[in-house]
Amino acid sequence: MPRLFLTLTLLLLFLLEGTILQVVSPTAWGLPWQAVPRFALVGAILVSFFLGRREGLYYGLGIGFLQDILYGHIIGVYSLTMMVACYFAGLVVLLFQRNLAVVFVTVCLVLFGHEWLLYSLYRLFSTSPVDVQWVISNQILPSVGCNFVFAVLIYLPLSRLCEAVDLRKSARHE
């Protein structure tokens, strides 16, 4: 039951980032920069911290595939970037101790890496002929900042939910 609740929570975050949060985006208010909410990705990154890189990879792949199908121009780009982002976030747990500083620095770096890889792939396929400096200052950094604030807000509830999933998984294996 906790795993179903975790999956439904990530799906709810995915629905929120594509519907309601578009109304409060900076571009809707006429600001020159745009912060793209990637709240489901933030949730999947945190899941990979708490449940391991394999589960984060699966959640990242699922959310990325939904993103590709519903909003993407090229099938597979979001699936690849979100899957890689969640996998590397889970890999950091193996290399460092999991404390708040490591988690939040890794979330920022992984979100930046995801946005940069996404821009690079679109640039490779020539669908995004935009200057790199403009993309970094007006798209990537505001998106990373917005999603970092969300990661700080959702860290504790998602960690408790992942603990419940982990307890259920360990009880099943005993």
Image (spheres, rainbow, N blue to C red):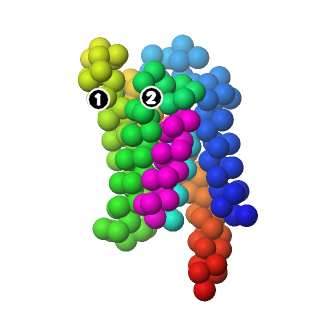
Tell me the magenta residue range. Answer: 52-67
Instruction: From this view, report whether residue 103 is shown above or below residue 135.
Output: below
Q: What is the quadrant of residue 105 in the picture? A: bottom left
Residue placed under numbered mark 1 in the picture: 120
Nearer the observer, 133 or 58: 58
At 39% from the left and 47% from the top, the residue drawn is 85
Q: Position of residue 43 (x, y in %)?
A: 55, 50
Q: Position of residue 84 (x, y in %)?
A: 37, 47
At 49% from the left and 52% from the top, the residue drawn is 58
Within 10 angstroms of label 2, few (less than 14), some, or many (20 or more) residues? some
At 33% from the left and 41% from the top, the residue drawn is 113
Residue type at mark 1?
Answer: Ser
Q: Position of residue 41 (x, y in %)?
A: 51, 44
Q: Is residue 4 magenta?
A: no
Instruction: From this view, report whether residue 2 is shown above or below residue 28.
Output: below
Q: Is residue 56 magenta?
A: yes
Secondary structure under tag 2 reads: loop
Asked whether residue 51 appears in the rendered view, the answer is: yes
Nearer the observer, 83 or 75: 75
Asked whether residue 148 appears in the rendered view, the answer is: no
Which badge, 2 or 1, is on the more N-terminal residue? Answer: 2
Residue placed under numbered mark 2 in the picture: 75
Q: Quadrant of the C terminus?
A: bottom right
Overall secondary structure of the magenta stretch?
helix
Secondary structure under tag 1 reads: helix
Left or right of 2? Residue 42 is left
Nearer the observer, 60 or 28: 60
Left or right of 3? Residue 62 is left
Q: Position of residue 31 (x, y in %)?
A: 50, 17
- 2 vs 1, front mark: 2
